[in-house]
Image (spheres, rainbow, N blue to C red):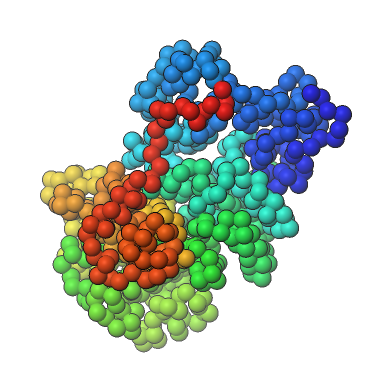
Amino acid sequence: MRSARKPVGLSHSQLRGITSTGRWSSPTLHTRPLSPTANYTGLLPPSLLQATLKMPNTTINDKHTVSPLKGGMSVLKSRHINQGTSFPPQLRTSLRLRGLVPPTQETLDQQIERVITFLNTLESPIEKYCYLSRLKSENVTLFYRVVIDHLTQITPLIYTPVVGEACQKFSLIYTPGLVEGLFLSKEDKDHIPEILDNWPYPNPEICVITDGSRILGLGDLGVNGMGIPIGKLSLYIAAAGFDPSRTLPITLDMGTNNDKYLNDPLYLGLRCRRPSDPDFFDYIDSVMAALRKKWPNMLVQFEDFSSEHAFQTLDRYRNEYLCFNDDIQGTGAVILSGFINALTMSGVPLNKHRILFFGAGSAGVGVASQLKDHFIKSGGMSPEAARDVFWLVDSKGLVTFDRGDKLPQHKTLFARSDNGGKQFKTLADVINYVQPTALIGLASQGGAFTPDIIELMASMNDRPIIFPLSNPLTNAECTFEQAMIHTKGKVLFASGTAFPAFLDPYSKQVLEPGQGNNMYIFPGLGRGTVLAKAERVTDDMVYQSAVTLAESLTEEERSEQRLYPRLQRIREISALIARDVIHTALREGLAHEPAIVRMYGASPGQPVPAATLRDEERAAALLTYVQERMWNPAYPEDFSGLKAMM
Ligand SMILES: NC(=O)C1=CN([C@@H]2O[C@H](COP(=O)(O)OP(=O)(O)OC[C@H]3O[C@@H](n4cnc5c(N)ncnc54)[C@H](OP(=O)(O)O)[C@@H]3O)[C@@H](O)[C@H]2O)C=CC1
Ligand SMILES: CC(=O)C(=O)O
Ligand SMILES: [Mg+2]
């Protein structure tokens, strides 16, 4: 087996995108099948050769060369195939697994019980995160069954808040051997197609892409931001049934302006500052073009870009590519949805609301824009009157045209000119001036809604709407308990990260706070867009996802004063959102999936009349169509697919 030839299979350039340090790293080994005739000695450090065992269908002999292997370890190391202790006896024989797993055969439920029991013995959230990441890399089916069956326990571990800590420590907890996404370094600008070729799974349907410049409310985390695309895509899979092997997390490594990481010897990203705007757009243009060339139908979700780049990339690509920005549009939709329900409960007519945003970045302006559209569409207000419902506060105070600083374009959408030359610096001053009915926190300033601020809101409103939406938990502007206590139970509340339930001493009810997080929107929005083979993601599709979410509450949920449905229903909700997003695509003539357009008697790209879309039978059939295409984690009963490995 030992070849006299120079190593082939993995050249240095083929490793691009998988290692961002230039150091040898075992994830490189997942990039493409290793050549059975190659000698990898010298190409890989001996300690890392062990990691080649992770490669399906390969093993290493004692001379450090790679040879094909059927069954055995290759099965256990294939995360999409591995069943561990669930493999039945006859399969253990044909797959040569006997002795490699403990003799007891377990059901998936028993495996889940072990995972949860062990998870509960771990103390720190980050240990739990690492354990779950490892589990996902070893057995995808078990991992997602655990997530789906224990959503309220697991979501905070794989998403906000713990994903925030995981990102901050990404370089520290990085595990060689775990390939969860692609790193596209700006130094690799001339190798982007080659890096995309390295991705081991064919035809991704959806990618979440970040440049790590504004991760949750934690700022510029550089390449450590990778935890966010991974976490978001885990929710796409769990909540909307995307096939795990067809999701692609991407982190653009364009350097970081965070000195802490630039000086951290363990930091895994480029050690340089972020590029100028022309260089940023030049690079991201190349990435977008390469993505479309390789995977023309893939939906791209932009995530956690610094605010100006978030708006600029959305404007630049939204009509040309199938894409959306989750922080602007997904957040806009989820908060509009909670707001629609809060409006009813507040008893204040739509046109009497005065809404104050604490934070004027991508999320703040994204939400304000979505609410404004609703005030126009549903409230019959003129664009000018709807615009006047909103006030923005940023780090310099109330955003006004005559404040003296140059406003970025997105702030001009809601900057005030009716302030009579007066400027307001503190939040309390602004509240006293605006007299808001709703206070929305999207400024990443943990604790900014002090008892005084909350009481001020309560003094002005029978049912103040207070949404501390910043993430992770440490950045929330106030807790549910504080909001309840300081409004004497009157608050209409939603937070970005989930807070525990609270026994309201006034109503004696145990109340669960709403979670106003875009995770209620993006899975269904993405599912609908991809299933419809939509040409692009339109404002109407985003708006519809908000309306569907708002209408999805059951009577019981409404009687519990919820603004959002129970998280446990998220798959059901995502299917409804996907169905209604497809309807919108059909109405707009943007759907191209033949099977779907045929259901409505149309051809691809042909608008379907609103009356046809109201047909309840077709709507029910479309919902079934969506549900039947949701990936459901379960071990196969038919093992013929494994024949090749026997
Ligand atoms: N619940 C959810 O689903 C979502 C929550 N978020 C959360 O929202 C937060 C903001 O995100 P995003 O808008 O994208 O971030 P940005 O960085 O784009 O915006 C942050 C805004 O907060 C303002 N700000 C900063 N410090 C203060 C201060 N002391 N007083 C008042 N305003 C201040 C900034 O002001 P300036 O412009 O002057 O710098 C800026 O306008 C994050 O915590 C994020 O996690 C985001 C998306 C979804
Ligand atoms: C939830 C989310 O997208 C954020 O905090 O950025
Ligand atoms: Mg985000």
User: In which quadrant of the rendered view does residue 309 lie?
Assistant: bottom right
User: In which quadrant of the rendered view does residue 199 lie?
Assistant: top right
At a point 33% along the width and 74% down the height, the residue shown is 372
At a point 25% along the width and 74% down the height, the residue shown is 378
Is 181 on the left or on the right of 400, as rendered? Answer: right
Say above or below: 502 vs 116.
below
The one nearer the camera, 264 or 231, is 231
Q: Residue furthest bottom?
A: 420
The quarter in which the C terminus is drawn is top right
At a point 51% along the width and 47% down the height, the residue shown is 247
Q: Is residue 91 visible?
A: yes
Say above or below: 533 vs 508.
below
The quarter in which the N terminus is drawn is top right
How far from the left and from the top, in percent, is residue 342? Answer: 23, 62
At a point 35% along the width and 51% down the height, the residue shown is 626
The one nearer the camera, 561 or 55, is 55
How far from the left and from the top, in percent, is residue 19? Answer: 68, 44
Say above or below: 237 vs 342.
above
